[in-house]
Amino acid sequence: MTVLLLGLLIFLGVHSVRILADDWRGAQIQRMGVLPWKAAYSVASLLGFVLMIWGYGQTRLDPVWVWQPPQGLSHVVSLFMIPAFVLLVAAYVPRNHLKAKMGHPMILAVKLWAFSHLLANGRLGDIVLFGAFLVWAIFDFRAARRRPPVEMANPSMAGTVTTVGVGLVAYLLFAFYLHVRLIGVPVM
């Protein structure tokens, strides 16, 4: 559990700099330059991510059960993950209506992912991992909505259709092939 907590602290801490210390972040970028800042950010994020994944894997070896979720909740997770994948893709596809309307679709995708996985997982390691991401996403979304909006090009139907299509294909690929291979757990 210690490695998981350390990984979460580093990974979410790095991703919280803009929430907690945006002025400091701006000063560091000004002092270091954009590329060195991104390099340091990436190295710290990667370190946190590796520790988080390793620590989470360790918690699965000797699980502490807090509650036993009903089997049917795995279907709810599958349903929530469809819009989560579409929102994740919306963060990267230019000129789509979802990003134009919601502003921060990736954070919303993280919220859906974390919340749905909290519903269907009752081990302590799961609750710590998904709960930490849910709390982080709530605060990050709140902070992001308070910043001035970023200028965006007018959304197009082509951008939106591409977003939904790629999101659905990514969901199907992950749900029916990659989840069990990467996470070690079948979707259903």
Image: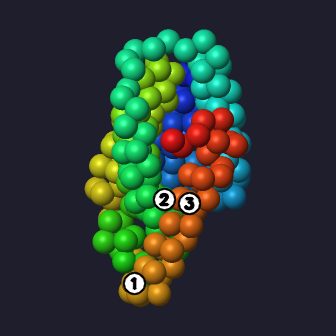
Q: Is residue 78 above or below residue 20?
A: below
Label 1 secondary element: loop
Q: Is residue 146 left or right of residue 28?
A: left
Q: Is residue 107 visible to the viewer in this orientation of the structure?
A: no
Q: Which quadrant, please, contains the N terminus?
A: top right
Q: Is residue 101 above or below residue 24?
A: below
Q: Residue at x 38, y 51 (%)?
A: 80
- Residue 135 falls in image quadrant: top left
Please tell me which residue is depicted at 54% across the width and 30% down the height of the picture. 8
Q: How is the model colour-coded?
A: rainbow
Residue of label 2: 85
Residue at image mark 3 = 172
Q: Earlier in the sequence, mark 2 or mark 3?
A: 2
Q: Nearer the viewer, residue 29 or 163?
A: 163
Q: Where is 59 relative to 144, above or below?
A: above
Q: Is residue 43 found left or right of 154 in the rendered image?
A: right
Percent across and percent down for residue 134 are 39, 38
Could you tell me residue 182's position as x and y percent?
68, 42
82 and 8: which one is in front?
Answer: 82
Q: How far apart, in angstroms, are the residues tagged by discs 2 and 3?
A: 10 Å
- The percent coordinates of residue 72 (x first, y second) are 37, 37
